[in-house]
Image (cartoon, grey):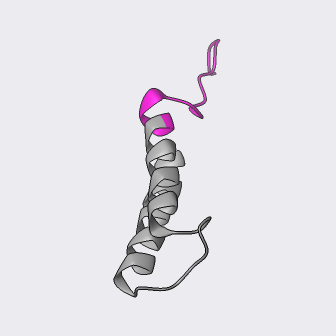
C-alpha cells in the first residue's frame, strides 16, 4: 500500500515539475518527491505489512 502511495506522489511531483506549476514552498516538486521516497523506504522496510501469528484454517 505504501508503494502505491509513493508512486502516486512521484507522479504528482513529475506533473508539478513538467508543467512548471508554481506552488508554494510546502508543495514544491522536491518536497513531494521526498515524501514519496519516505513512503518507498517505509514500504521496503516492511512497515505496514500484516503478519498474522497462528494458523489459518
Screen quadrant of the C terminus: top right
Q: Residue at x 61, y 74 (%)?
A: 24
Q: Is residue 36 above or below residue 10?
A: above
Q: Residue at x 61, y 29 (%)?
A: 50
Q: Per the image, is 21 magenta?
A: no
As drawn, is 33 to the left or to the right of 25?
A: left
Q: Residue at x 35, y 82 (%)?
A: 18
Count of marks overlaid on the render: 0
Q: Residue at x 39, y 77 (%)?
A: 17
Q: Position of residue 47 (x, y in %)?
A: 56, 31
- Give the quadrant of residue 20: bottom left
Of 18 and 43, nearer the camera is 18
Dominant SS type (magenta): loop
Q: Is residue 8 above or below residue 54?
A: below
Of 3 and 27, nearer the camera is 27
* In the image, farthest residue toward the left: 18
Q: Per the image, is 51 magenta?
A: yes
Q: Which residues are magenta?
A: 42-57
* In the image, farthest residue toward the top: 54
Of 54 and 12, nearer the camera is 12
Q: Position of residue 11 (x, y in %)?
A: 42, 70
Amino acid at each position: 500500500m505504501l508503494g502505491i502511495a509513493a508512486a502516486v506522489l512521484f507522479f504528482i511531483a513529475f506533473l508539478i515539475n513538467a508543467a512548471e506549476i508554481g506552488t508554494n514552498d510546502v508543495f514544491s516538486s522536491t518536497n513531494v518527491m521526498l515524501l514519496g521516497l519516505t513512503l518507498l523506504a517505509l514500504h521496503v522496510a516492511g512497515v505496514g505489512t500484516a503478519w498474522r501469528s497462528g494458523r489459518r484454517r
